[in-house]
């Protein structure tokens, strides 16, 4: 059985980078796939990967990570400025970040109109 845990942006907004990383790792270590509103800063993504590498063991094989966010290709100038100001003021609330344990997620493919989450064959536990 797959378990997804939604993490709203508001739950992460008041945490510092180290606290965000710790919270995400604790959820993934419970074999849950995180669907997080928004995205991490590039430095936080790097920190998450680094911390994960330090924790790899027989029981914890690492993570798979994918960020999906809308691109403002055809927006008018004022609309782009408005979105930029909102990001500066309230953070990266746009988009979706998927993080899951490498023992469950084999690969995450991001295409313009869909996300493919490929899992390892999981043995049923009775």
Image (cartoon, helix red, strand yellow):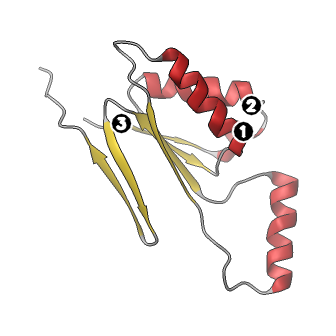
> Is there CB contact under 8 Å for labels 1 and 3?
no
Q: Which residue is denoted by mark 3 in the rendering?
A: 3
Mark 1 vs 3, N-terminal side: 3
Nearer to me, 27 or 61? 61
Q: Position of residue 16 (x, y in %)?
A: 78, 30
> Is there CB contact under 8 Å for labels 2 and 1?
yes
Mark 2 vs 3, N-terminal side: 3
Q: CA distance from mark 2 to mark 1?
A: 9 Å
Callout 2 crowding tier (Cα within 10 Å): few <14, some 14–19, many ≥20: some
Q: Nearer the viewer, mark 1 or mark 3?
A: 1
Residue 104 located left or right of residue 40? left
Q: Residue at x 67, y 44 (%)?
A: 40
Q: Nearer the viewer, mark 2 or mark 1?
A: 1
Q: Secondary structure at mark 2?
A: helix
Image quarter of the C terminus = top left
Nearer to me, 31 or 102? 102
Residue 88 visible in image? yes
Quadrant housing residue 86:
bottom right
Q: CA distance from mark 2 to mark 3?
A: 25 Å
Q: Position of residue 80 (x, y in %)?
A: 80, 76
Q: Position of residue 115 (x, y in %)?
A: 40, 60
Q: Residue at x 59, y 22 (%)?
A: 51
Q: Which residue is denoted by mark 2 in the rendering?
A: 17
């Amino acid at each position: 059985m797959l378990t997804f845990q939604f993490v709203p942006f508001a739950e992460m907004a008041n945490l510092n980078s180290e606290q965000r990383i710790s919270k995400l790792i604790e959820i993934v270590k419970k074999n849950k796939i995180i669907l997080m509103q928004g995205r991490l800063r590039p430095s936080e993504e790097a920190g998450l990967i680094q911390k994960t590498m330090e924790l790899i063991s027989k029981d914890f094989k690492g993570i798979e990570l994918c960020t999906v966010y809308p691109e403002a290709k055809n927006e008018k100038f004022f609309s782009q400025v408005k979105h930029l100001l909102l990001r500066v003021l309230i953070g990266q609330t746009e988009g979706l970040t998927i993080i899951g344990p490498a023992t469950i997620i084999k690969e995450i493919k991001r295409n313009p109109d869909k996300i493919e989450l490929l899992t390892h064959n999981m043995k049923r536990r009775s």
